[in-house]
Image (cartoon, rainbow, N blue to C red):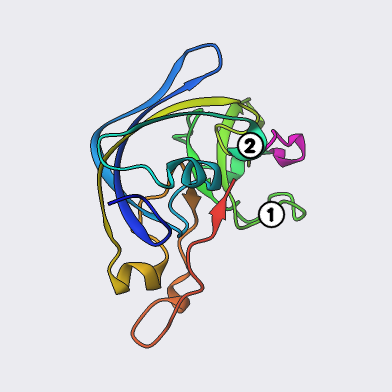
């Protein structure tokens, strides 16, 4: 079967920057929904009409990957607003009360620097601004089931960062608006 819109593919990959530094390796095949929100558009486009056993090598510019780095998503916030056990690289869903009111609340923020009185938070995707090279191996292709197509995802996004829906948007009879992809 060839890859088409609304099918499921099992992939492994090696992701590198343009200097050849390895950024991520997926050794065991993971299933993704093509035609949903699991994969970046350029990756889906490159996979179309390929079959199990094929390898696809792709170069992604920042605009086709995780966007350009936006320094407007850097925020210097008071240190006392954060837990004592704070480390560089820690992530937060949104910002704690008392932080810059103009900062978008529905993002994941990562601690990039810690100072005695302040913390620097970065709302960019960790791969923003980086041109990427990815080598994908297609291990299997199958038709998507009705429930998979209806959800638009198998729940495993390609380097996607999602903020969970609040409790009031979860439960029986409630259809949440779906994952909010941030990058």
Q: Classify 182 as above or below 125.
A: below
The answer to which image quadrant residue 125 occupies is top right
Q: Residues within 10 Å of mark 1 (few under 14, many from 20)?
A: few
Nearest to N terminus: mark 2 or mark 1: 1
The answer to which image quadrant residue 63 occupies is top right
Q: Is residue 42 visible?
A: yes
Q: Classify 60 as above or below 44.
A: above
Q: Secondary structure at mark 2?
A: strand
- The percent position of residue 138, horizontal first and vertical second, equals 30, 38
Horizontal side, residue 146 vs residue 64: left or right? left
The disc placed on residue 122 is 2
Magenta run includes residue 72: yes
Horizontal side, residue 38 vs residue 95: left or right? left
Q: Secondary structure at mark 1?
A: loop
Q: Nearer the viewer, residue 89 or 71?
A: 71
Name the residue carrying label 1: 104
- The percent position of residue 21, horizontal first and vertical second, equals 47, 14
- The percent position of residue 117, horizontal first and vertical second, equals 66, 30
Q: Nearer the viewer, residue 91 or 59?
A: 59
Magenta run includes residue 174: no
- The percent position of residue 139, horizontal first and vertical second, equals 24, 39
Q: Nearer the viewer, residue 109 or 58?
A: 58
The answer to which image quadrant residue 172 occupies is bottom left
Instruction: Check the picture and name the quadrant holding the C terminus.
Output: top right
Which residue is painted at 55% across and 37% down in the image?
110
Q: CA distance from mark 2 to mark 1?
A: 11 Å
Q: Which residues are magenta?
A: 66-76
């Amino acid at each position: 079967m060839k890859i088409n819109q609304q099918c499921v593919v099992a992939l492994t990959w090696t992701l590198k920057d343009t200097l050849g530094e390895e950024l991520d390796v997926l050794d065991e095949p993971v299933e993704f929904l093509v035609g949903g929100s699991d994969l970046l558009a350029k990756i889906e486009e490159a996979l179309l009409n390929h079959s199990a056993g094929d390898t696809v090598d792709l170069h992604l510019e920042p605009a086709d990957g995780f966007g350009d780095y936006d320094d407007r998503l850097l925020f210097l916030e008071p240190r006392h607003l954060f837990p004592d056990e704070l480390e560089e690289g820690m992530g937060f869903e949104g910002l704690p009360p008392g932080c810059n009111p103009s900062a978008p609340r529905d993002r994941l923020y990562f601690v990039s620097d810690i100072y005695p009185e302040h913390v620097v938070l970065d709302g960019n995707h960790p791969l923003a601004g980086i041109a990427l090279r990815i080598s994908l191996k297609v291990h299997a292709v199958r038709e998507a089931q009705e429930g998979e197509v209806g959800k638009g995802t198998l729940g495993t996004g390609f380097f996607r960062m999602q903020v969970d829906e609040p409790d009031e948007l979860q439960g029986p009879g409630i259809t949440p608006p779906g994952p909010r992809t941030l990058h």
